[in-house]
Image: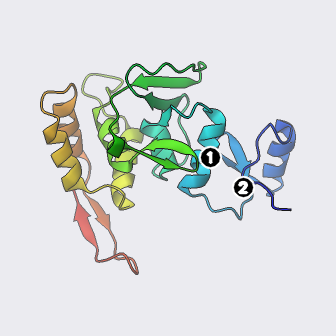
């Protein structure tokens, strides 16, 4: 009989799951657990997201989406989700909900969950207000840099998309933040192509 890729507190009590982590039998995957042999891919992480946020109208966004795409090591607390305009979704205090206009090309479905595309994720991370005036916190900067380094986001296309925003709030800030990211060097990898400096 096949076993599920993810285990949750619906399957086992949390103390047993945590004991299995200490024994090396399981690893945490967001709010769930999996075998250490299980590939930590976007489909697995998005399934963990659907357990945490079961409403399929909510799309993983910002750092939650960056975590699903593998750009950050852990999901944020609170979970960050986006819903379309005028969509009403119930959310608990551990979920930060943003109502935004999402185009059909801004969201993909992976592992049963809606997730903002890597490009839309980077765009949103660049536009989100910082904790202080003009501030771009380290985690968001690392997430954008990682999305680029992983080859999931093309910097020139992202810059063009920011320019196309015109006078939308935080568009100029997003341009400045993108320019301020440190240059990334992606080494040559077998089957991927030559090394490239990305700005």
The residue shown at (61%, 53%) is 44
Q: Residue 47 carries which label?
A: 1
The residue shown at (76%, 54%) is 4
Quadrant location of residue 25?
A: bottom right
Q: Is residue 158 visible?
A: yes
Crowd rating for badge 2 (residues with CA inside 10 Å; few <14, some 14–19, many 20+)? some
Answer above or below: position of 183 versus 97: below
Q: Distance between the residues labelled 1 and 2?
A: 9 Å
Residue underneath mark 2: 5
Q: Which sits earlier in the primary sequence, circle 1 or circle 2?
A: 2
Residue 163 at x, y percent in the picture: 13, 40
Placement of the C terminus among the 4 image quadrants: bottom left
The residue shown at (35%, 42%) is 104
Q: In this image, 182 relative to 34: left or right?
A: left
SS assignment at label 1:
helix
Q: Are marks 1 and 2 in contact (CB under 8 Å)?
A: yes
SS assignment at label 2:
loop
Residue 29 at x, y percent in the picture: 65, 48
Q: Can residue 179 be seen in this view?
A: no
Crowd rating for badge 1 (residues with CA inside 10 Å; few <14, some 14–19, many 20+)? many
Quadrant location of residue 52?
A: top right
- Camera-side residue of 125 and 5: 5
The residue shown at (39%, 77%) is 189
Residue 116 at x, y percent in the picture: 41, 42
């Amino acid at each position: 009989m096949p076993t599920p890729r993810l285990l949750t507190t619906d399957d086992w009590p949390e103390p047993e799951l945590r004991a299995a982590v200490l024994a090396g039998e399981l690893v945490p995957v967001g709010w769930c657990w999996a075998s250490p042999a299980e590939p930590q891919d976007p489909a697995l992480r998005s399934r963990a997201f659907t357990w945490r946020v079961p409403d399929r109208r909510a799309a993983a966004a910002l750092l939650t989406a960056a975590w699903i795409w593998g750009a950050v090591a852990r999901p944020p607390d609170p979970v960050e989700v986006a819903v379309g305009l005028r969509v009403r979704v119930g959310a608990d205090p551990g979920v930060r909900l943003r109502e935004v206009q999402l185009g059909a090309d801004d969201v993909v479905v992976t592992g049963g969950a809606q997730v903002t595309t890597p490009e839309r994720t980077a765009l949103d991370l660049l536009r989100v207000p910082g904790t202080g005036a003009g501030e771009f916190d380290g985690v968001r900067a690392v997430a954008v840099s990682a999305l680029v380094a992983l080859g999931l986001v093309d910097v020139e296309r992202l810059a063009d998309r920011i320019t196309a925003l015109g006078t939308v709030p935080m568009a100029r800030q997003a341009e400045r933040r993108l320019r301020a990211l440190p240059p990334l060097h992606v080494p040559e990898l077998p089957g991927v192509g030559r090394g490239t400096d990305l700005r």
